[in-house]
């Protein structure tokens, strides 16, 4: 039998080889014609065969066809369509330069390329926004914000105004992998969530994966936000920037060697704190960041890139409290073209998240953070026009610093201490295939194998029955167990080891040229845990690796959807329903202390989570008015059962809503271009209020009023809603003037809705009656920003 299988395999291989000898490959790079910036996700379509492909993250495409004459159509949102006749009698390398749709000759009208759904591509649960779409959306203080923009997409929410991070399909903010030029960003917010760390001027492309996640991605459960920076103008030197109420920004780009190398440098900083000094207020709150990228083409087959990001937030109260935190990343990449069918990318990446705290009033400094060293090698193999392979290997080395304390003066009474550092190694290998079976049926399938080693050097506690959390049957509560001993691990000794296989599968079946149904399944594994008892990540939150107590989180997700383009692609509709389950989702016992806790296993319990829902995205893609409506109906729940029949678990072992459950989530986004001078935009957001736990009674004990709380997350804050509007004025550019200006006026929350960020309960000291106090972050906020480009 094995011999027969081998013979069959060889026969099939020889048949494919013989067939491929009659075919030739068309490949090349597609770039912006004005600055030679490579373009991601450009559609390359062959009219005669009705087949096509997309450019990868570096603008490369490859398609193999039988010998013959073809019409190649190139299309990309915001650019003029391009079409060219090709006689394919040999392998051809053909580069294309696209022109922006706005740059047209007088008396010539060009209709923007339509943003249609790719009906036949087996890609679902993926949302893309162009930078132009993001810049046209009204935002708080006039600061264009990538994170805030993706909150208008179906299945995406956050914990509320002034909260950092985002939640996807009911997952925690720590379950999102945020990548900037392939480097991990551990905290995506400035000023505790008011702004994101991404300078929109420096960003080229972004894509959000919510499901059907390709096997090349791993390490998180809920989503992948993949962001790429600009490469810089290879032809000419240009600058642009903007001045806003809160911050200003500037970007410079130009050639290192014309047509071969380029650079881009972008800086941004806030200055609202300077106004505090005018009124003798000694407090400070500001941020700054720097984006850089160098690119150079060694020859037709080799390109190198060096990109980096550095950002910091500073929060200071007088001179006694100073909080500094932020991300630093550096990435060196080498693209190599082995042939017109085989593309490779080698990346060496460094990521660092730092958190520092200076308390002069007490007399100590506190430092914590996480460092990540990552090397990855990816290959894209365009075997034929109907079959493509992506495969590669990745390795991450983690250095966790839970906390280091140092006294700043002799009389502080503080002893220097370093909480035990933690180390881990995560390795993975993957393979992905995209396979067109018939004209209407296309499959995508892959497998990711991951291995995680929790390494020494560290001294760990041991516990009776190996249980760091015990259950007090008398009081029916969970308590931290007392250690019965310790065990020490030497440097690079393995404390715990985990291996997991993560299959991925999706398909698309085209009912016709405008309609299709799609489905996907993926398993994901997350070995890192964010130790936080807040619904929104804070700078002080600490990352911890999986070990013998903190088990890896495992997700299984299925999704089914219907997709349609109609009325000549003027409109598009995407509907999806999803269901996912998570094992080993961490929750905390009542009264858990997480800060500077060297034995975090004594306050956590492993449980399960589940989320399910329906998502709808309806777009208007063309015309003077464009926009979209997104709606999500969903439920997100968690369960922690008792480990024995005598234990109650959390919430008596029943399912309870997570802190980021939002039953209804509605967004309306519209942009209207009145003429060449004026554009208008508006957003309307409605969300079910965040789940909370309110007291449902009280009792007195020795003269003290003690509240009695309801079941966990049984209540909700009031529903959240607001309307934002903006107007953009672009004055006509005078002939001979080398710069172009733009004014952006906006109003955030135009009807001054005081949305509840939290509700606390207290006893009124005058009347002795109980009262609820609502905290709101923002009401009516006007803004103005002046942008300039030259």
Image (cartoon, rainbow, N blue to C red):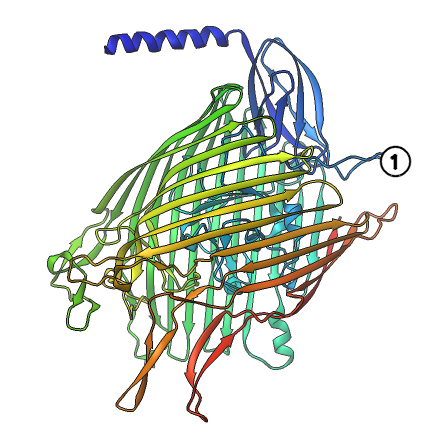
Counting every numbered tag in the picture gives 1
Q: Is residue 62 left or right of residue 326?
A: right
Q: Is residue 215 left or right of residue 685?
A: left
User: Judging from the image, what secondary structure is the residue with disc 1 in?
Assistant: loop
Crowd tier of the residue under label 1, counting other residues whose Cα lies within 10 Å: few below 14, some 14–19, many 20 or above:
few
**Residue at 62% from the left image edge and 23% from the top image edge:** 45
- Image spot of residue 351 (x, y percent): 43, 49
- Quarter that holds the N terminus: top left
**Residue at 27% from the left image edge and 60% from the top image edge:** 604
- Image spot of residue 738 (x, y percent): 81, 47
> Quarter-wise, where is residue 262 in the image?
top right
Q: Is residue 255 left or right of residue 328?
A: right
- Image spot of residue 424 (x, y percent): 30, 47
Q: Is residue 595 left or right of residue 114?
A: left
Asked whether residue 636 is in view, the answer is yes
- Image spot of residue 309 (x, y percent): 52, 50
**Residue at 38% from the left image edge and 45% from the top image edge:** 580
Q: Is residue 387 above or below residue 789?
A: above
Q: Is residue 285 above or below residue 299?
A: below
> Quarter-wise, where is residue 408 in the image?
bottom left
């Amino acid at each position: 039998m094995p011999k027969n299988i081998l013979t069959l395999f060889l026969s099939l291989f020889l048949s494919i080889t013989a067939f491929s000898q009659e075919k030739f490959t068309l490949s090349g790079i597609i770039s912006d014609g004005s600055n030679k910036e490579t373009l991601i996700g450009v559609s390359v379509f062959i009219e005669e065969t009705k087949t096509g492909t997309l450019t990868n993250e570096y603008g490369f495409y490859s398609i193999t066809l039988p010998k013959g004459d073809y019409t190649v159509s190139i299309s990309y949102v915001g650019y003029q369509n391009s079409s060219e006749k090709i006689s394919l009698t040999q392998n051809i390398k053909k580069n294309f330069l696209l022109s922006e749709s706005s740059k047209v000759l007088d008396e010539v009208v060009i209709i923007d390329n339509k943003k249609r759904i790719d009906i036949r591509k087996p890609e679902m649960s993926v949302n893309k926004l162009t930078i132009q779409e993001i810049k046209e959306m009204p935002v708080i203080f006039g600061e264009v914000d990538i994170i805030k923009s993706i909150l208008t997409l179906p299945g995406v929410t956050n914990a509320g105004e002034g909260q950092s991070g985002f939640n996807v399909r009911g997952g925690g903010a720590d379950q999102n992998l945020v990548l900037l030029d392939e480097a991990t960003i551990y905290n995506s917010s400035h000023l505790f969530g008011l702004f994101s760390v991404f300078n929109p001027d420096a960003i080229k492309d972004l894509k959000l994966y919510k499901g059907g996640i390709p096997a090349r991605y791993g390490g998180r459960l809920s989503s992948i936000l993949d962001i790429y920076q600009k490469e810089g103008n290879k032809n000419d030197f240009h600058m642009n920037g903007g001045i806003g109420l809160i911050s200003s920004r500037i970007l410079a780009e130009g050639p290192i060697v014309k047509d071969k190398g380029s650079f881009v440098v972008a800086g941004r900083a806030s200055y609202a704190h300077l106004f505090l000094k005018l009124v003798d207020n000694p407090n400070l709150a500001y941020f700054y960041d720097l984006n850089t990228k160098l690119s150079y083409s060694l020859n037709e087959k080799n390109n190198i890139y060096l990109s980096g990001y550095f950002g910091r937030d500073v929060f200071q109260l007088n001179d006694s409290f100073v909080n500094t935190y932020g991300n630093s990343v550096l990435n060196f990449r080498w693209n190599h073209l082995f042939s017109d069918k085989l593309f490779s990318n080698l990346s060496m990446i460094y990521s660092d998240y730092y958190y520092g705290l200076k308390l002069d009033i007490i007399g100590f400094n506190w430092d914590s953070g996480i460092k990540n060293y990552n090397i990855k090698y990816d290959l894209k193999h365009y075997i034929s026009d109907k079959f493509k392979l992506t495969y590669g290997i990745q390795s991450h080395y983690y250095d966790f610093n839970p906390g280091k304390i140092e006294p700043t003066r002799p009389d502080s009474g503080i002893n220097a201490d370093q909480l035990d550092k933690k180390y881990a190694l995560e390795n993975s290998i993957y393979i992905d295939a995209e396979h067109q079976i018939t004209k209407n049926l296309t499959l995508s399938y892959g497998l990711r194998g991951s291995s995680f080693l929790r390494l020494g050097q560290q001294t760990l506690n041991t516990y009776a029955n190996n249980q760091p959390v015990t259950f007090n049957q008398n009081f029916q509560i969970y308590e931290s167990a007392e250690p019965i001993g310790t065990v020490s691990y030497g440097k690079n000794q393995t404390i715990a080891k985990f291996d997991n296989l993560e299959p991925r599968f999706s398909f698309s079946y085209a009912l016709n040229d405008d309609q299709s149904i799609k489905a996907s399944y993926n398993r994901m594994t997350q070995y890192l845990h964010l130790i936080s008892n807040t619904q929104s990540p804070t700078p002080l939150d600490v990352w911890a690796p999986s070990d013998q107590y903190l088990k890896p989180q495992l997700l299984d997700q299925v999704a089914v959807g219907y997709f349609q383009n109609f009325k000549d692609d003027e409109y598009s509709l995407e509907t999806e329903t999803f269901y996912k389950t998570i094992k080993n989702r961490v929750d905390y016992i009542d009264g858990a202390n997480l800060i500077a806790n060297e034995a975090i296993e004594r306050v956590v319990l492993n449980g399960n989570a589940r989320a399910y829902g329906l998502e709808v995205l309806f777009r208007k893609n063309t015309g003077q008015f464009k926009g979209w409506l997104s709606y999500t109906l969903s439920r997100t729940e968690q369960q922690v059962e008792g480990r024995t029949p005598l234990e109650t678990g959390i919430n008596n072992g029943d399912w309870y809503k997570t802190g980021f459950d939002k039953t209804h989530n509605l967004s309306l986004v519209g942009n209207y271009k009145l003429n060449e001078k004026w554009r208008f935009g508006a957003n309307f957001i409605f969300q079910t209020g965040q789940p909370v736990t309110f007291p449902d009674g009280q009792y007195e004990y020795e003269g003290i009023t003690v509240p009695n709380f309801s079941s966990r997350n049984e209540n909700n804050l009031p529903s959240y809603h607001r309307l934002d509007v903006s107007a953009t004025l672009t004055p006509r550019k005078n002939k001979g003037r080398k710069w172009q200006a733009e004014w952006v006026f906006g109003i955030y929350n135009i009807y001054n809705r005081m949305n509840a960020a939290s509700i606390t309960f207290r006893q009124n000291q005058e009347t002795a009656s109980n009262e609820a106090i609502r905290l709101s972050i923002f009401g009516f906020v006007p803004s103005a920003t002046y942008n300039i480009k030259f």
